[in-house]
Amino acid sequence: MQFNEARRSFLTASAAASVLALGGCTTVQTKDAAQAEPEIDRSYLSMYRAMPEERFPIPAVDLSKVDPKFYRRLVDDPTGETPGTIVVDTRSFFLYLVRPGGKALRYGVGLGRAGFEWSGRGVIAWKQKWPKWTPPDEMIERQPELEKYSVRNGGMPPGLTNPLGSRALYIFQDGKDTLYRLHGTPEYWTIGKAVSSGCVRLLNQDVIDLYDRVPNDTPIIVRNGMGRYV
């Protein structure tokens, strides 16, 4: 009888210890999971790698500071436009390059005041690698310190600190410059946001990818939402 009681006591104590041990593991795992950084797919790390081969070496993007929905990816085309068309949706902060087969390459963008000022149909009439930047006179009036970068003074030389970044694509409509640009930026934290100045900015790695995919005279549509322009 005493043996049975002792055995029951031992089993009860063992079970309690097991529960405590299991509970301890669960708590530790939960804490670790909460503290762990989300794992980023290696394909995106490669996509947004450093680019030392560029004229001005581009550092890797800190993807932990960019919402994953703005990473470049192939998606079902929501625009209904002809393959080869660029569509900028200023409402969602996405740029689409329409591909055959009902697909589109989607890029995240940031927008400045100028990015909301123009909409409609145009064409990419000119592309430039590592462009100069010449602020418009209206901007210089607000910020006189930018006069040194005016057209009269030859603009800001290209480089990593140039507001147009590694590439610029210039939008014309009816043969006239709209002053609306697609351009690169090293300021990855501005993707998916409205910022103080500029047109449509993409990560430098993304604007290089787009630049290499589209020729001059590529049609472009800028609109607020997915309503069609006819």
Image: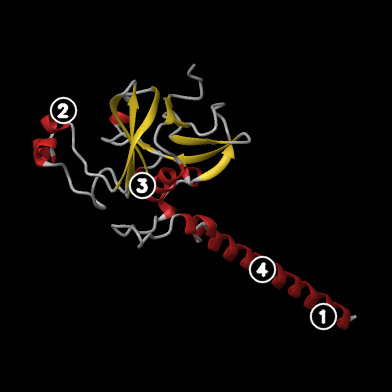
Rounded to the nearest whole Å, what is the CA distance between mark 1 and mark 3?
Answer: 65 Å
- Pointers 1 and 3 in contact (C-beta within 8 Å): no
Q: Label 2 belongs to which residue? A: 138
Label 2, secondary structure: give it: helix
Between marks 1 and 3 in the image, the one whose residue lies nearer the viewer: 3
Q: Are marks 3 and 4 in contact (CB under 8 Å)?
A: no
Q: Amino acid at mark 4?
A: Leu
Pointer 1: what residue? 6
Nearer-N-terminus badge (2/4): 4
Q: Quadrant of the N terminus?
A: bottom right
**Dot in front, 3 or 4:** 3
The correct choice, above or below, for 79 with respect to 7 in the image is: above
Mark 2 neighbour class, 10 Å CA radius: few under 14, some 14 to 19, many 20 or more:
few
Please state which of residues 105 and 62 is positioned toward the viewer in this rendering: 105
Q: Position of residue 89 (x, y in %)?
A: 45, 29
Q: Is residue 66 left or right of residue 1?
A: left
Of helix, strand and loop, which one carries label 4? helix
| First in residue order: circle 3 vs circle 4 | 4
Q: CA distance from mark 2 to mark 4?
A: 69 Å
Q: Tell me the crowding category of disc 4: few under 14, some 14 to 19, or many 20 or more residues within 10 angstroms, Cα based.
A: few
Separation of disc 4 and disc 1 at Cα?
Answer: 21 Å
Q: Residue 64 appears in which quarter of the rendering?
A: bottom left
The residue positioned farthest toward the bottom in the image shown: 3
Q: Contact, CB < 8 Å: mark 2 with mark 3?
A: no
Separation of residues labelled 2 and 1 (CA atoms): 91 Å
- As drawn, the residue found furthest toward the right would be 1
Q: Say which residue appears at 39% left-offset and 28% top-offset.
A: 123
Crowd tier of the residue under label 1, counting other residues whose Cα lies within 10 Å: few below 14, some 14–19, many 20 or above: few
Relative image position of residue 47 (x, y in whole percent): 47, 55
The residue that mark 3 highlights is 189
